[in-house]
Amino acid sequence: MKNAIPRAWTRLALPSAGPAALALLTAVALTSGCGGTPAPASSPQAAATSSAPSTGAPGPAASSPAATPELFGTEFQAAPEHDWSKGGPPPFEGVLRGWLTDVDEGGVAEYRPIRFTQSGGEDGHFDGPEEGDVTRYAAPIAEDVLFLADSGCDGSSQTYDKATNLGTERCTRQTLIDNVKEAASLAGVEGLYRPALITTENGRITKVVEIFWQGGG
């Protein structure tokens, strides 16, 4: 076919003793050097911050558009908060598993999230949002977009990596646009839209990699 746990320190309890005994114990601790043995109060914090790079590292990655969803994920990717009833659809910044469903004359494409639904064994198909759901995105296709097709630029051959199920043949921006327009003109035909990983950066679609599967769309 989509992290540091502070350590708890144990306190040693001394049996109750009179003032003289306590003074003697204090003097012994100061002169013998044993007073440095218990870890200072700041040690647990130091231990916790020593692992901070591993907990802090995901910060930049979270805002990076490079994260790749599961090819055959069974859930729609979460949509950024947006009031779909106002204005045009926004771009989806990052990598969306989706369908390109239309392209206007200015090269602005509409695209929707998809999920994979199994129908028994390894059979299944990709689904878009239910009818009436207005979740969709729009962004211009970059002039230098990287488009990798899974069935050749003319759709007549298999050009995908069998290990990843991702298209490998680089085709032109115009081929991508023509393919989307053809599919849009025959909307409603099952399996017509090509599932793909759609990368949007800085408001432009910069990469489209088709996902191969035997069912088609």
Image: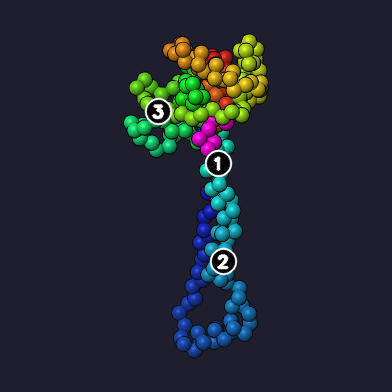
Asked if the residue under mark 3 is in contact with the one under mark 1, i.e. CB atoms within 8 Å, the reply is no
Residue 49 in view, yes or no:
yes
Residue at image coords 47%, 33%: 91
Q: CA distance from mark 1 to mark 3?
A: 22 Å
**Which sits earlier in the primary sequence, circle 1 or circle 3?**
1
Question: What residue did someone put label 3 on?
Answer: 135
Closer to the camera in the image, 117 or 185: 185
Question: What residue did someone put label 2 on?
Answer: 43
Residue at image coords 54%, 63%: 45
Question: What residue did someone put label 1 on?
Answer: 64
Residue at image coords 58%, 20%: 174
x, y percent for residue 18: 46, 86
Which numbered disc, 2 or 1, marks the residue closer to the eye? Answer: 1
Outermost front residue: 106
**Quarter assignment of residue 158:** top right
Judge left or right: residue 199 versus residue 112: right
- The vertical placement of 184 against 11, above or below, is above
Closer to the camera in the image, 44 or 90: 90
For mark 1, give the secondary structure: loop
x, y percent for residue 146: 62, 27
For mark 3, give the secondary structure: loop
x, y percent for residue 166: 62, 24
Asked if the residue under mark 3 is in contact with the one under mark 2, i.e. CB atoms within 8 Å, the reply is no
**In this picture, which residue range is highlighted in magenta?**
201-207
Closer to the camera in the image, 77 or 189: 189
